[in-house]
Amino acid sequence: MNISMIGVGKMGLPMARHLLASGYRVKAFDASPSARKGALDAGIELHESLEAAISAEALIISSLPDDAAFLTVGQAVASKARSGTIFLDTSTISLEASAKVAVLCADRKIQYLRTTVSGNNKMAEAAQLTVMASGPQATYEQVKPILAAWGPVQFYLGDAEQARLMKLVINLMIAATANMLSEALVLGQKGGLDWKQMWDVICSSAVASPIIKAKAVQLREHDYAPTFTVAQMQKDVGIILAAGAQLQVPLAMTAGIGQQLQAAAAQGDVGLDYAAVIRAVARSAGVSVK
């Protein structure tokens, strides 16, 4: 099967490489010159334009940074792709933007499958993503071998925006974990507990989730190199709050998380890992930040 991959950044490139390694012919398009170079360096052929990627007789997969980029691509797919084309999108975007493209694709009989993924770029590199799909079930069954190239677990969640919503549920819990750690660790640090020893105890306790253990590797060394930045998490929290407003669900804690992320961004940590909310809380408590 021929695959057009639109968006080969931190997540899209490793996903494209796994598809190539699985025996699919993959051609990519990305507006970024550095992303295009990364694809070429990985042995992936390039489409000359977005229109070429869409008009090719291929399955279309997109991995895009935000609503604006997704709507540009989704509307182009709906208007230019041939009837019957399969369009998979893996982006974290709003329910509203996804539903808008769903209507456009249905009008053109394009099979639109929302295929969100849970995991960071390191998990994408290791083919350890969890895939959550929603849309036409027959399409899901058809492309399930392709989705398996990205990780060992795939879920089919329903025929509409369920995969988008499930991704927001997971990202809400990830953001909340960082926020919880920020207050707990700074409380302990200011009270005189040793930073590294706190991590040792936490990772041996009942609260040690897989994400806490994964974060501990970097954070016990005060390493905030980003797997997912403050800016990216701000975007996702904004989408989560919008979904809460749409569904009339009070998300008071999530609103507070958004404020902590804003504090981290205002203090110059916008490009660091989202766990830099720990640094923001430390500063507010008068604790020295390494």
Image (cartoon, grey):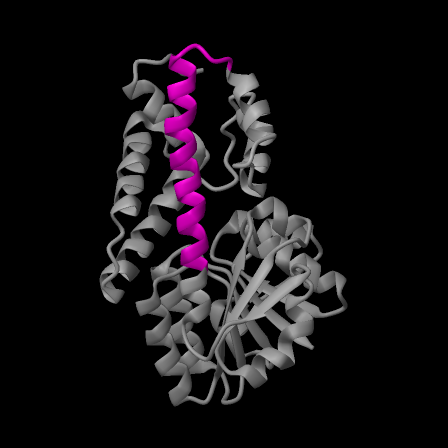
| Count of number-bearing discs | 0
Return the residue nearer the eye: 151 or 93. Answer: 151
Side of 50 where 147 appears, left or right: right
Residue beneath the point at 58% across and 42% down: 210
- Residue 130 point in image, percent of width and height: 59, 58
Return the residue nearer the eye: 112 or 4. Answer: 112
Q: Quadrant of the N terminus?
A: bottom right
- Residue 162 point in image, percent of width and height: 43, 70
- Residue 199 point in image, percent of width and height: 55, 24
Return the residue nearer the eye: 3 or 125. Answer: 125
- Residue stretch in magenta: 167-194
Residue 107 visible in the current orientation: yes
- Residue 100 point in image, percent of width and height: 32, 75
Q: Quadrant of the C terminus?
A: top left
Residue beneath the point at 69% across and 63% down: 149
The answer to which image quadrant residue 244 occupies is bottom left
Q: Is residue 37 above or below residue 60?
A: above
Side of 262 where 61 appears, left or right: right
Side of 73 where 20 appears, left or right: right
Return the residue nearer the eye: 34 or 155. Answer: 155
Q: Is residue 129 above or below residue 77?
A: above
Residue extending farthest front: 206
Q: Is residue 159 above or below residue 214?
A: below
Dominant SS of magenta comes to helix
Residue 271 visible in the current orientation: no
Residue beneath the point at 38% across and 24% down: 279
Q: Is residue 23 magenta?
A: no
Residue beneath the point at 57% across and 82% down: 139
